[in-house]
Amino acid sequence: MTGRISLVRSLVATLLLALAGAVLLPWQIELQYRGKAAGFRSISLNLGLREQIGQSGFLAALSGFRSPLAAILWIEAHTAWEKTEWGRMASLFDTVTTLQPHNLLYWDIASWHMAWNASAAALQDTKQSSLALRERAARQYIALGRDILERGIRNNPSDYLLYERLGILLRDKQQDHSAAADAFAKAASMSSSPAYIKRFAAYEVSKVPGREKEAYDRLRSLYEGGERFPTLLSRLEELEGKLSIPKEQRISTAAKSPSTSHRTSK
């Protein structure tokens, strides 16, 4: 008897979700159309997503309950992180970002967990005796973190945050300074981006062989604009030597001393 009641309840719940989907679907289609017109990518409610979240979850997503479903799966992903279940965590993050592609926090934290936490865990994995295999696994997690950010950018091309995070990953995890400079420069081109990102882009250019003159011009422009940060001054001094800048055109020794207000800044 109890089994029959549970079955009836399940059928009723499924029917209600389907009915809600039928009511909300025209509105959702219109919303997606407007989103595309504004330059956003829409969620793909396809068989791949259905396999990831199951029949009930797929119906919930179809019925307009993507946000609460994503929040529930995000909590599950956090639990997987606590248990160091990296593969399950990655799968859950993929589902969450599919359900909520315009939530920057999901892309940002998902990438951080893979590129930083999972990669560090792989390097310290005592079950794997081969250092080469541990390093390979770490690189794979870092690459996955990068892929997450790049997919996030494709879904949110007009926001600086994920470009900045990509620049940090390229700089700190892959030591690809040329690509990092490009990512920071793209972030800096956004009207809402903080001023320091433009400086970060110039720093990365200064690390790329053959781009010293470009780096010098960028850093000198920031200097002429009033910036006196210690890293900026030291990079300029280094580049002045490499480029054989005439002494009369170099920054004066007095100007290289950072002011009190900038002494703790980068």
Image: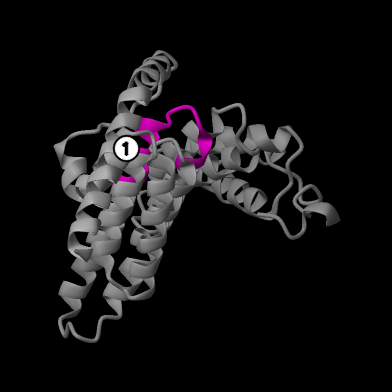
**In the depicted view, which residue is nearer to us: 249 or 10?**
10
Above-or-below relation of 112 to 24: below
Q: Residue 32: x, y in percent?
A: 37, 21
Instruction: Tell me: 177 left or right of 230.
Output: left
Query: What residue do we see at 76% from left, 45% from top?
Result: 252
Q: Residue 231: x, y in percent?
A: 63, 54
Bounds of the magenta span?
A: 147-162
The residue at the far right in this view is 260
**In the depicted view, which residue is nearer to us: 105 or 170?**
105
Q: Amino acid at mark 1?
A: Leu
Q: Can residue 24 be seen from the camera position used here?
A: yes
Query: What residue do we see at 25% from left, 63% from top?
Result: 88
**Quarter holding residue 249:** top right
Instruction: Tell me: 134 left or right of 102.
Output: left
Residue 160 drawn in magenta = yes
Q: Can residue 214 be seen from the camera position used here?
A: no
Query: What residue do we see at 19% from left, 64% from top?
Result: 1
**In the depicted view, which residue is nearer to us: 237 or 83?**
83
The residue at the far front in this view is 1
**Magenta stretch: dominant SS?**
helix
Query: What residue do we see at 17% from left, 82% from top?
Result: 128
Q: Which residue is mark 1?
A: 16
The C terminus lies in quadrant: bottom right
Q: Residue 63: x, y in percent?
A: 34, 34
Above-or-below relation of 66 to 10: above
Q: Secondary structure at mark 1?
A: helix
